[in-house]
Amino acid sequence: MAAEWRKIRGILDELLNNSFQAGATVVESRIIDDGDAFTIIVKDNGRGMSEQVREMAEEMLGQDRRRELEEYYGHLAGKTAKSSGLTIVGMMVDEYTLETEKGVGTEITVRIIKD
């Protein structure tokens, strides 16, 4: 269980860091454990994403989950690194939704299905 919460914390840290980098002054976050999966939701009032940035974010978040790399790379999510933390998040989640509006903010929801 500790490994799951460490992974969740890394994902949450990354999403929160992105909100603050986008100039958000209000950030709401939730973690839901429904028994079968963990859902992490981060909503902010930051700058929102341009269409180009949104496409890049969706590409990073939408990659296949790589369970064999989670333990190795999971601690890097939320840290400043040369590669995007969203790439690392994308490797650790099963599903995502991304809603964003330029000048209004962004909401990202990721879901991790339990083994």
Image (tube, helix red, strand yellow):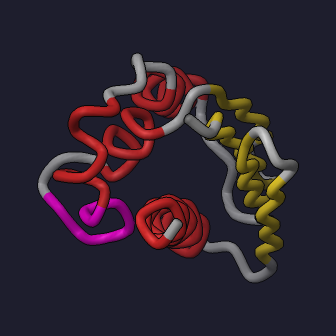
Residue placed most toward the observer, 49 or 77: 77
Count of marks, rendered view: 0
The quadrant of the rendering that contains the C terminus is: top right
Figure quadrant of residue 108: top right
Left of 31 or right of it: where is 77? left
Q: Residue furthest bottom?
A: 25
Left of 45 or right of it: where is 76? left
Residue 56 against residue 113 in the figure, above or below: above
Residue placed most toward the observer, 96 or 57: 96
Kindly report the secondary structure that dominates the magenta region of the rendered protein. loop
Residue 66 percent coordinates (x, y): 32, 27
For the point 56% across and 75% down, the residue is 20
Left of 23 or right of it: where is 87? left
Residue placed most toward the observer, 50 or 85: 85
Figure quadrant of residue 86: top left
Residue 77 included in the magenta stretch of the image = yes
For the point 41% across and 19% down, the residue is 63
Residue 65 against residue 45 in the figure, above or below: above
For the point 66% across and 31% down, the residue is 96
Residue 54 percent coordinates (x, y): 57, 30
Please give the range of residues in magenta: 75-81
